[in-house]
Image (spheres, grey):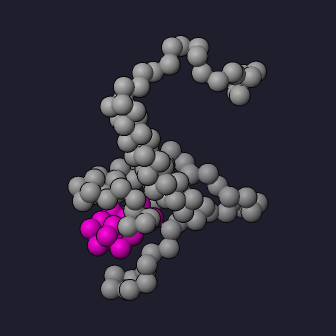
Amino acid sequence: MGFFSTTPAQPASPKPSADGAFEAPNRQSRRACWTARDDFFACLERNNIIDSIRESSKADEKCREEGQTLERECVSSWVTYFKQRRVMEHNKKQTLERLKAEGARPMPEGMGPPQGPGGVS
């Protein structure tokens, strides 16, 4: 993407290794990705944007630079995951707050669904 280009930046894709398999991001690239994610999310918070996928035009308007950095630093599947997880975490927090306001209490230890071997139900 050029400096004055109107085409959006393409999210990074994993790089194939010499044998054709895709390389996992190394520690340095993961750190750069997480920093870009944190900066993008901070911008979304400042602008009261919860879902940057559904509100993509508002997110692009307010957080374009941070979003482009996120897409440049992270593989595309991570970008999608981060954006979806942000919405899921928000919804979870809202649900827990609503339940608490309605008087719900946490279940006593050991009162959850039955667990199979290894803690998997």
Residue 49 locus on image (x, y percent): 31, 59
Which region is colored magenta?
56-71
* Location of the N terminus (image quadrant): bottom left
- Furthest residue in direction left, as rendered: 46
* Residue 31 appears in the picture as rendered: no
Taking the spot 45% from the left edge, 75% from the top edge, the residue there is 9
Question: Foreground: 108 or 33?
Answer: 108
Q: Is residue 18 a member of the stretch shown in magenta? A: no
Quadrant of image for the C terminus: top right
Q: Is residue 68 magenta?
A: yes
Residue at the (39%, 69%) spot, across then down:
56
Residue 38, above or below 100: below
Choose between 22 and 104: the one closer to the eye.
Answer: 104
Main secondary structure along the magenta-highlighted residues: helix
Can the viewer see residue 30 in this picture? yes
Determine whether, in the image, residue 64 is placed left or right of residue 23: left
Location of residue 65 in the rendering, given as x and y in whole percent from the top left corner: 31, 68
At 42% from the left and 39% from the top, the residue drawn is: 95
- Outermost residue toward the top in this view: 109
**Could you say where residue 109 lies in the image, as x and y percent from the top left?**
53, 13
Q: Would you say 36 lies left or right of 113 here?
A: left
At x 51% / y 14%, what residue is drawn?
Answer: 108
Near-viewer residue (3 or 114): 114
| Residue 37, horizontal then vertical, whole percent | 39, 53
Determine whether 114 is above or below 87 in the image. above
